[in-house]
Image (cartoon, helix red, strand yellow):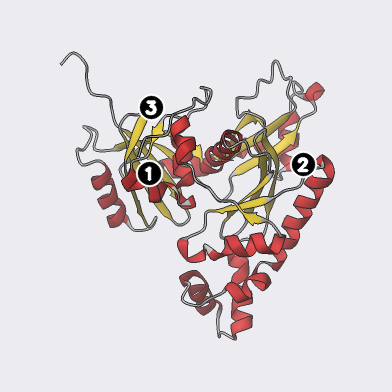
Amino acid sequence: MLFSQKAKGFFVEVNDNGVLLARTSSSTAPFTIEDMRECPANDTAALEEAINQIQPKKSPSGYLHATVSVYPAKRLVRRHSLELKRVKEPGYFAEVCSQQFRIEQDKYTIALLNATDGSDFDAVKAVQKDVVFCGMPSEDAVATQEWLLAKSIYPERIEIGSLALLGAMVDYLAFTKSKTPTLVLELGAESTQSFIVTSSGVEASRPIAQGLDAMVPIVQKELGLKDDESARKLFYSNTFDFTGMGPLLIKKLLKELQSSIGFYEVQTGQSVGQVLTTQLSPKLAWLDGAIASGLGLSSFKLDPLAWLRSRHVTVPDTLAKNAQDIRWFGLLSLMVQYFTLHVAVPEEKK
């Protein structure tokens, strides 16, 4: 054969709820998604089985070579306006980290991206003041790599999942010609990452010290349960319909979100119109509607198939349902490359 077959692409997302895996016909677009699988994050046997299914023919190294996204609990994804005249001052970025983000710069692995297009911030030229600080504790980065290798996953690239998803949201809004500022929430156990994005980029960011675990004591009190553990099991299992209790469970979170939205709307004169809640397990998916209702916003409706086509990622009919589920949007975001302009792709004839 004159031409060797293109190497398959493998993509893995590790989040609080599980591990998502996908195989594509090539490692770089244009490609077709060939398989999508998921398993619980803490089930080693299930993950081993999922890797065997996604990569039936093992690589010579024995590892699944993949592009990986992760969501460390202490991830840093913060928009900030720099004082350009101070950018070249020694210690300026350390000062921003300690005073604005309450972290020690030397304990984090950090990168700076331009807030509008996600490109690398150039401190030498420094013409754009609005940036996104992104990173994670250096010890978490090492622990993540060790965990992946122990699970037979060799990360060719590790990204913070929030960044891939925010980049995809900005591009999706531009592709659909949506002018509506959108609230993007990542609900974790201990905290919530809150972002406001438009087709022009990441407009605002704020971590909120209210997560899913903060709802457990309310469940315990309202239902008269004897201990925290019983309330936790009930809340996370979804064997009880919590929708009626929703407004009470998210009351504190809503107050913080209303404050963030109000500040943004006063600053920009634009109204936030919709909300997208990510990182929810299927059992807690009802929270998205509860938050949207509590804020008086609509739930963001995602249909990424045409957008993916415009970025030369083809989803076969057998996997379309998966791709349209918001839980997979972060993994799909990892596949997309943005250095090309959108190309109009004709609709396939039925």
Q: Nearer the viewer, residue 171 or 177?
A: 177
Q: Which mark is residue 121?
A: none
In this picture, residue 84 sits left or right of residue 198: right
Determine the residue located farthest toward the top in the rendered image: 2
Q: Which residue is mark 1?
A: 148
Mark 3: give few (<14), some (14-19) or many (20+) Cα within 10 Å: some
Quadrant the N terminus occupies? top left
Q: Earlier in the sequence, mark 1 or mark 2?
A: 2
Q: Which mark is residue 30?
A: 3
Q: Can you tell which of label 3 and label 2 is closer to the viewer?
A: 3
Residue at 75%, 29% (x, y): give it: 92
Residue at 54%, 37% (x, y): give it: 168
The part of the image, by quadrant, that contains residue 286 is bottom right
> Residue 22: x percent and y percent?
35, 42
Secondary structure category for the residue under label 1: helix
Residue at 58%, 64% (x, y): give it: 287
Q: Is residue 68 above or below residue 217?
A: above
Q: Which residue is mark 2?
A: 99
The part of the image, by quadrant, that contains residue 347 is top left
